[in-house]
Amino acid sequence: MHFALLADAEPINYKAALNEKMWKNAMIEEFNSINRNNTWELSEFPANKKAIDVKWIFQIETEAK
């Protein structure tokens, strides 16, 4: 029952999220937090390695954890 109520509120992919101000602001906030916390650095990618995928999850939290 709850899933039906949230189906229109949560974007199904990155492109859909960029079209909604709330989700775009959340993405910017998350990216700024990552930068502030220095959790990554830009570096050269080794030619003999395989990159891992990155996936954004767009979900409204319904309960405090």
Image (spheres, rainbow, N blue to C red):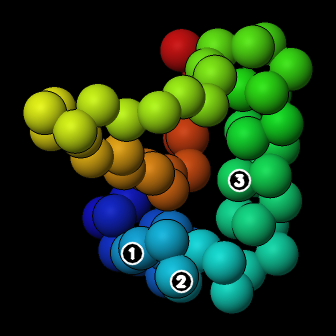
- Horizontally, residue 16 falls left or right of residue 12, namely right
Q: Is residue 44 above or below residue 40?
A: below
- Element at badge 3? helix
Disc 2 marks which amino acid?
A: Ala
Residue sitting at the far front = 47
Disc 1 marks which amino acid?
A: Ile
Real-space CA distance between mark 1 and mark 3, rounded to the nearest whole angstrom: 14 Å
In the rendered image, which residue does mark 2 sit on? 16
Disc 3 marks which amino acid?
A: Met
Q: Residue at x 54, y 28 (%)?
A: 43
Real-space CA distance between mark 1 and mark 2, rounded to the nearest whole angstrom: 7 Å
- The percent position of residue 51, horizontal first and vertical second, equals 24, 40
Q: Are marks 1 and 2 in contact (CB under 8 Å)?
A: yes
Q: Which mark is residue 12?
A: 1
Q: Is residue 1 above or below residue 63?
A: below
In the rendered image, which residue does mark 3 sit on? 27
The N terminus sits in image quarter:
bottom left
